[in-house]
Amino acid sequence: MHLDVKEIKDFYYRSTLGRVAKAAINKNLSNIWPETKGLNVVGFGFSVPFLRQYLAGSRRVIALMPAQMGVLAWPSDERNVSVLVDEKRWPIDTGHVDRLIVSHSLEHSIDPSTLFAEAYRVLGPGGRALFMVPNRAGLWSRTDGTPFGQGKPFSAGQLETQLRLHGFLPEKHFSALYMLPSRKRSLQRFAPFLEKMGEKLPFLVGGLIMLEASKLPNNITGSPVLDQKKAGRGVLEGLSNGQPKPVLDVNNKKAG
């Protein structure tokens, strides 16, 4: 079940904890994709806090928001680029996306396979997708007071497995939100220090998994066994071309 769009908006734009989290995630994004000049950048789910830095230099930026979540006009100070969509059918041409951010969506999806399929379809050659999900081993997924404590969290291994099953090649793994999910401002002051330490100390667990993936070409879906074309056998052999197999009588002679 998706959170309401207003709940997530209030977290990122009206709470100090949300603003600190947004800054930490955007810092990682700036390092992952520092330049998107001339590229088509799309976000699915609630991605607007992370898309703003790409508005100026990108060829086009679009924020897709699933119907279960709701939609809000964004950006408020410029021409609207957000669209309410069906989670299973994105209004984007096949292969037209260069950079895709999937956030606050996969952990709530009732049909993850279709979501992955749409992400695969819209991503173009050489494109990159960034899937962001709550880390099941982190403290943020255990805190109900933030959007990261809702839905189904993932481990890095689980997310990588799902990506490979749906035609993606995991490229780089990142983490964010090493700070405590506390609303106490005295603790939030240490957020920049903890985020920097998290990058250097492997035993620290971040609350958010950020996994960049590319698109494997010629992805084959379905069962290779069931999808094999089999030749006709027995009584039905030959019906496909209008030439039924002659039936033999008991004397091994052609009937009638």
Image (tube, rainbow, N blue to C red):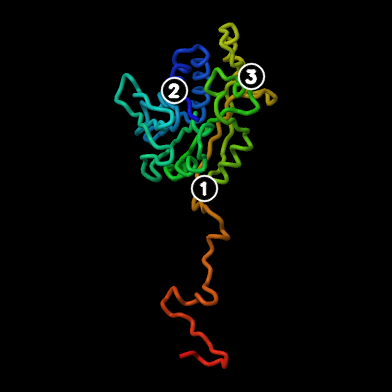
Q: Which mark is residue 197?
A: 3
Q: Are the residues tagged 2 and 1 within 8 Å (C-beta)? A: no
Provide the secondary structure element on which disc 1 rests. Answer: loop
Side of 40 where 150 appears, left or right: right
Observer-nearest residue: 71 or 215? 71
Provide the secondary structure element on which disc 2 rests. Answer: helix
User: Residue type at mark 2?
Assistant: Pro
Mark 1 = which residue? 216
Q: Which mark is residue 49?
A: 2
Q: Residue furthest left?
A: 79
Nearer to us of marks 2 and 1 is 2
Provide the secondary structure element on which disc 3 rests. Answer: helix
Side of 159 where 26 appears, left or right: left
231 relative to 143, above or below:
below
Identify the mark nearer the N-term, 2 or 3: 2
Residue 113: x %, y % from top left: 51, 43
Residue 98: x %, y % from top left: 42, 38
Which residue is drawn at the image coordinates 52% and 52% (left, top)? 221
In three-dimensional space, the C-alpha distance between marks 2 and 1, rounded to whole angstroms, equals: 29 Å
In three-dimensional space, the C-alpha distance between marks 1 and 3, rounded to whole angstroms, equals: 34 Å
244 relative to 230, above or below:
below
Which residue is drawn at the image coordinates 31% and 26% (left, top)? 80
Identify the mark nearer the N-term, 2 or 1: 2
In three-dimensional space, the C-alpha distance between marks 2 and 3, rounded to whole angstroms, equals: 24 Å
Which residue is drawn at the image coordinates 50% and 41% (left, top)? 116
Residue 121: x %, y % from top left: 44, 45
Residue 106: x %, y % from top left: 51, 34
92 relative to 248, above or below:
above
Observer-nearest residue: 248 or 220? 248
Side of 52 where 245 appears, left or right: right
Q: Are the residues tagged 2 and 3 within 8 Å (C-beta)? A: no
Q: Quadrant of the C terminus?
A: bottom left
